[in-house]
């Protein structure tokens, strides 16, 4: 349902904000080779242990490596001399398979790991941003809009080496669990361009979302457990690069740069029990990107 609402928002923005004239638009198609990870943690209340700073009796933490190549597209349509609409999307169709981890502690008994397992992580990831940009000075724009990021992780080929504080060596060949995480909310930021030569310019932007809705959902197939997470958080997205004008034309160019995204949770809860706190969720991804920019 959430995906359908998201698509509807994109379509509605295009219909509502595109001008009726024949103003030229800019389209950028590119590739972002991103690497990073997503982790999340829940805490169980209780008496706790002497070395704990809170009253958590237990903690569960999942870690997913996340890397791969995003195909990106950015559409910009002028609305007036100083205002334009920008729609950006990125799709990573298949995460590079890598080893994730599942860790559990029971501090009411011991401070050591109660359970430790590994699995092969695969899946996919997408993001999009819809913004209105306003020129506020030479080469500087203020923008505001909406950001969305969704990742789905698939866990297979499980193996655990610690169970109930005991060393072991056991495989989970039937593991086929999933966990998805969505961050979305309004954001604002600045974009800037500094012309270095007639063909070369430095470009950059940064966006921050302090009021982010964070939603997670897991399906543990070996336990037939379906659970949901809901919380509040923040998003940060920044990039910097060099833009080179091709064939003496400023409206056709190549941009090489570096991008960093971080999404994090302030606090949240799990629907299986009011006593469980969704205490942490952090996703980071960064890497080099290359865009081709064309004006029509």
Image (spheres, grey):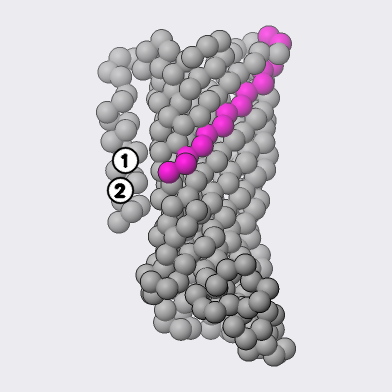
Q: Where is residue 252 drawn, in percent x and y?
A: 57, 19
* Residue 97 appears anywhere in the view: no
Q: Is residue 162 visible?
A: yes
Q: Toward the viewer: 60 or 122?
A: 60
> How many callouts does the rendering have?
2
Point out residue 154 in the picture as x, y percentages from the top left corner: 52, 68
For label 2, the crowd category at 10 Å Cα-Cα, with few meaning under 14, some 14 to 19 and many 20 or more, is few
Q: Is residue 293 above or below residue 90?
A: above
Q: Position of residue 115 (x, y in %)?
A: 63, 82
Q: With respect to residue 96, does 248 lie above or below? A: above
In-front residue for pair 27/48: 48
Q: Main secondary structure of the magenta part?
A: strand
Magenta-tinted stretch: 197-211
Residue 276 in the image: above or below residue 170: above
Q: Which mark is residue 9?
A: 1
User: Which residue carries the number 2 mark?
Assistant: 5
Task: Tell me if 252 is positioned left or right of 84 in this view.
Answer: right
Instruction: Look at the image and tell me in which quarter the C terminus lies.
Output: top left
Q: Are marks 2 and 1 in contact (CB under 8 Å)?
A: yes
* Separation of marks 2 and 1 at Cα, in angstroms: 6 Å
Q: Is label 2 in a helix, a strand or a loop?
A: helix
User: In percent of the image, x 61 and y 27: which residue is there?
Assistant: 204
Tell me residue 192's x, y (percent): 58, 21
Q: Is residue 200 magenta?
A: yes
Crowding near the residue tagged with mark 1, few <14, some 14–19, many ≥20 C-alpha atoms within 10 Å: some
| Residue 296 on the magenta span | no
């Amino acid at each position: 349902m959430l995906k359908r609402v998201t698509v509807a928002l994109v379509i509605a923005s295009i219909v509502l904000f595109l001008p009726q004239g024949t103003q030229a638009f800019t389209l950028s198609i590119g590739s972002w080779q991103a690497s990073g990870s997503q982790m999340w943690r829940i805490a169980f209340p209780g008496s706790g242990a002497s070395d704990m700073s809170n009253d958590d009796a237990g903690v569960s933490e999942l870690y997913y490596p996340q890397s791969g190549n995003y195909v990106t597209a950015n559409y910009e349509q002028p609305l007036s001399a100083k205002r334009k609409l920008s729609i950006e999307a990125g799709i990573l169709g298949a995460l590079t398979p890598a080893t994730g981890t599942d860790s559990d502690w029971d501090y009411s008994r011991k401070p050591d790991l109660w359970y430790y397992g590994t699995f092969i992580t695969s899946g996919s990831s997408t993001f999009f941003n819809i913004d209105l940009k306003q020129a506020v000075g030479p080469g500087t724009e203020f923008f505001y809009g909406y950001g969305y990021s969704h990742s789905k992780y698939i866990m297979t080929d499980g193996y655990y080496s610690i169970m109930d504080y005991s060393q072991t060596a056991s495989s989970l060949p039937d593991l086929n669990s999933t966990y998805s995480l969505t961050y979305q909310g309004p954001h604002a930021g600045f974009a800037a361009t500094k012309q270095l030569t007639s063909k070369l310019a430095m470009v950059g932007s940064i966006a921050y979302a302090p009021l982010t809705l964070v939603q997670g959902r897991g399906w543990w197939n070996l336990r037939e457990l379906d659970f949901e997470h809901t919380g509040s958080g923040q998003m940060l997205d920044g990039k910097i690069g060099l833009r080179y004008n091709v064939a003496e034309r400023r409206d056709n160019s190549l941009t090489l740069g570096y991008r960093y995204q971080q999404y994090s949770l302030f606090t949240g809860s799990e629907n299986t029990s009011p006593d469980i706190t969704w205490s942490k969720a952090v996703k980071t991804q960064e890497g080099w990107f290359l865009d081709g920019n064309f004006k029509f």
